[in-house]
Image (cartoon, rainbow, N blue to C red):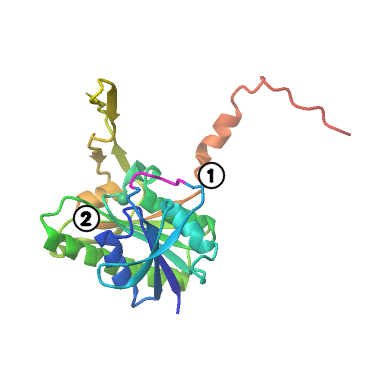
Amino acid sequence: MAIILVTNDDGVHSPGLLALRQALTSVGEVTVLAPERNWSAGSHAKTMHKPLRVTPVKLADGTPAYSSSGSPTDCVALAAGGVLGVMPDLVVSGVNRGYNLGVDITYSGTVACAMEATIKGIPGIAVSTGFDVEGETEMAEVLALAGRVAGQLAEQVLARGLPAKTLLNVNVPALAPAQIGGIHVTRMGDRRYPLEELVTRDDPWGRPYYWLGGSAPVDVPDDGTDVGAVRSGYISVTPVTLDMTNHPFVETLAAWDFAAVQPRAEQS
Ligand code: MN
C-alpha cells in the first residue's frame, strides 16, 4: 500500500488536516507530520540554524500523528530524510483554510510543502479552501468534499505519476457541495493585492509597531484560471511547475547590453 504523508501549514490540530487524513485512508497508509503551530504565509521556510524536534501527538479523532517544531517544508524534508521510518510515495498538504490562488502560491506554506516534496522526488498535491462559509457544519461539508477530491487525485497521481518538477494545486470553493459546478483544470490566474495598508499603532512605551497583511485581494476572474474557476463555483486543479523561467523572454533578454563584463579570451 502506498505511503502518504499528510502535512499542512495551519498546524497539526487544524480541522482541514484531519479531514484530509480521514479521506486519504482509503487510498493509502497515511502518516501525519505537521508543524506544531500555524505557519500560514510562511512560504518555503527552511530551518538550518537550530535543531528540530518531532513529537508524537493525537489528532481530534484519536489517531496518532507527529508534530514538528519546524516549518511546513521542514516536515516534508524530515519525512523524506527518513524520520518516520518510511519514505512517503506521495505528499498531500492541506486542507488549507484560505485559498491559494494566483500569486498566493508564492506566499503559501501549503503549496511549499508540495514544492518541497517535488524537489525531493516525491509527487505533491496542495489542497486549499476559503474562509467564507456560514458555520461549522458547512465548513465540515466543504472539507469533506476537498478530501474526496484529494483522494481521487491522489489515486491517479500514484497510478499515473506527474511530470518532472510538477505539483498539483487544488482549490475548493467554500460553497455547499450542491452548489459546486464540478472540477476545472486551470492555469495560475491573477489575484492583485492592493498597496499594503500599513496599520501603525503605539505600544505601551510609545514606540510604533506595525501590522501587515490586512488588505483583501482583488480577484481577476479570467476564464481558464484558478481564480476564475473558484469565483464561478468550480474546483480548480492547476499543474504548477518549479521551472520559474519566463521562457519566451529568454531570447529578448539575451539581446540586452551585457558589455559590463567582457567575454573571456577563448583558449585554443
Ligand atoms: Mn495556512
Dominant secondary structure of the residues highlighted in magenta in the image: loop
* For residue 258, side relative to residue 195 (left or right): right
* For residue 94, side relative to residue 132 (left or right): right
Quarter of the picture containing the C terminus is top right
Q: Residue at x 50, y 57 (%)?
A: 77
Instruction: From the image, tell me which residue sits under label 2.
Output: 173
Q: Is residue 45 above or below residue 178?
A: above
Element marked by disc 2: loop
Instruction: From the image, tell me which residue sits under label 1.
Output: 49
> Magenta residues, as a range?
40-45
* For residue 144, side relative to residue 84 (left or right): left
Report x, y in % for residue 17.
30, 62
The front one of 126 and 248 is 126
Note whether residue 71 is visible. yes
Residue 82 within the segment the image draws in magenta: no
Q: Quadrant of residue 194?
A: top left
Q: Say whether disc 2 or disc 1 marks the residue closer to the N-terminus.
A: 1
Q: Quadrant of residue 153?
A: bottom left
> Given this view, does label 2 or label 1 mark the residue nearer the observer?
1
Q: Residue at x 27, y 47 (%)?
A: 227
CA separation in Å, label 2 and label 1:
38 Å
Report x, y in % for residue 122.
50, 63
* The residue positioned farthest toward the right in the image shown: 268
The front one of 201 and 53 is 53
Q: Amino acid at mark 2?
A: Pro
Report x, y in % for residue 183.
27, 61
